[in-house]
Structure formats: C-alpha cells, structure tokens
Image (tube, rainbow, N blue to C red):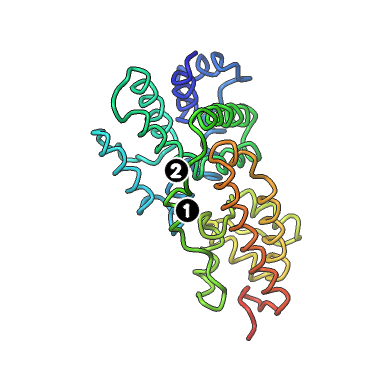
Amino acid sequence: MSRAGLLRALADLAARPHAGSAAVAQALELPRSPTAAEHADLFDFQVYPYASVHLGEEGMLGGDARDRIAGFLRALDVTPPPEPDHLVVLLHAYADLSDLAASGAPRADHARQVLLHEHLGSWVGRFLARVVELGAEPLRAWSRLTVAALAAELAQHGAPPELPPALREAPALPEPEDATAADWTQGLLTPVRSGLMIARADLARAAHDLGLGTRVGERAFVLRALLDQDARAVLGWLAGEAYRQADDLAAVAATGGDDVAAWWRERLHRTADIIERQLSGGATDDGTERA
C-alpha cells in the first residue's frame, strides 16, 4: 500500500463505520473494525476529531481555526466541505496532495508541508494519544498506526521552521482573578488555552478518585459541579492531570516536531502552576482565589 493509500485507509476508519470498514481494517492488519457504538462513544462524546476544538480560542467547533483550514483549501482551488477541519478531510487532503506532488504538480509539495505542519501536526498528536487512552482496542490500534504514518511524513519533510500560527497566536489561560468563574472553567476545558484535553471520561475518573458525586451534562457543567463540591480537591486533581499529560507528548513530537511538543508542555506546566498558586493562596468554594 502506498503512503497516500495508507492515509486514505486511515481516514476511512476515522469516519463512521460502513459496509466496507471491515475490509479496510483487515487491509491495515487491525484486530477488527470499530463498531458504530465504539466510534460514536469516542468521537461524539469523548475526544473530537476536529482541529477547531483543539486549536480554537473557545475550544468549540467552528471559528477562526475552521476558517483558516477552509481558506487553505480554497487556496488550492478546492471547495471546502461543511466540516473542513475534520480529521477525515485533512487526511484525505494530505493524501491527494501527496499524489499531486508525486506527479510533479507545482506547489503540491509545499502545500502538503503546510497541511502537515500547520493543520495536522499542531494538534493531531495530542488527539491520537487520547484515543489510545480512551478508545476501544480497534481505535487504539488505528491511532498508533496513524501516529506512525504521520511520523513518517514528518521525518521525510522535517520539522516546521516555526510554530504554527494557531499556536503562536493562541491566548493563554487567564489568571483566575482576571476572569469570571465560568470563563475560567471554560478556559480549563479549552486545549489551546490550558493545554489540557479533558474528556467526559476524565471528569468521571476525577469524581471516582475524589469520592465526589457526578452530574450529567456538558463538560463545563460537570466540572463546575465537581468544583462546587470540593474545589481544593478538584483543583489538585487538575494540576496533577496537567503534569500527567505533559509527560505524555511523544505522539506530539512524532507528528508535529519537538518545538510543538515543547509548546504544549509549557502550556500544561503553566496551567499546573496557576492552579498550585491558587491552592497555596487558598481557593474558595467556587474555585477562584481568595484576595
């Protein structure tokens, strides 16, 4: 299988399962194809395969992060699909550019490097590492294979000459005294601000580890409910989680380069430092800092 063919096959398995998924999984020598339930639980409720969620200032779908990728596709004379920042779209676009580069098409190789460095390497390693932690076995195997495939592309093209714009321009997590409690909580759940990638399963794990009650709802609602029960314990758990995730950036270095991994590590360490300063100063019941 060619490298472009491999990337298309990996993209196929990142899409919702279909009648041909089993054959694709077999071709990739995966244990089996993911079921519809396994795919939905991971990609609809835990970790989201959209660049905008990981690179956007609000940690949500759409916004400037999606617009940046749509503009990139338009520059290639490609009409952006409704979800241009979905990993399936990005992997297919990379495979198409690889074929064009092999045929000698002008600009194709440069465009392929921009796509790899700016729109994939900036976030996909973190996403894939979380898939390995949270996904069913076929998706974990798919994630490892995807990391290896993109690492091979990075090894061929080299690390980016500078950090991707989405990282260079990303606002950091604000100090608690400079934001409302709701905004600060949302900042913790916004990867590009805090460095953290917190899934619903992580919040359930925190509640279990800390002996707290859980609530059903969006992550911000669940996190606020946990903080309302025991702010100090939950903040301590979040600091520990930031350090844990900072120690697990091998996939980021492999797919985005050492500088990208260092950027995520610095952001995670800064978040842990902010939280620890809160704890040393005394956090109130709502998680904000006492004067």
- At x 71% / y 71%, what residue is drawn? 232
- At x 68% / y 55%, what residue is drawn? 241
Numbered badge on residue 50: 2
Q: Position of residue 21 (x, y in %)?
A: 49, 20
Q: Quadrant of residue 284?
A: bottom right
Evaluate if marks 1 and 2 touch, with contact meaning CB atoms under 8 Å apart: no
Q: Is residue 108 above or below residue 230?
A: above
Of residues 188 and 19, which is closer to you in this image? 188
Q: Secondary structure at mark 2?
A: loop
- At x 63% / y 19%, what residue is drawn? 31
Q: Is residue 115 above or below residue 164?
A: above
State left or right for residue 234 relative to residue 29: right
Give the labeled residue for mark 1.
Answer: 167
State left or right for residue 15 relative to residue 215: left
Outermost residue, bottom direction? Answer: 291
Q: Is residue 226 above or below residue 241?
A: below
Mark 1 or mark 2: which is in front?
1
Q: How many marks?
A: 2
In the image, what residue type sits under mark 1?
A: Leu
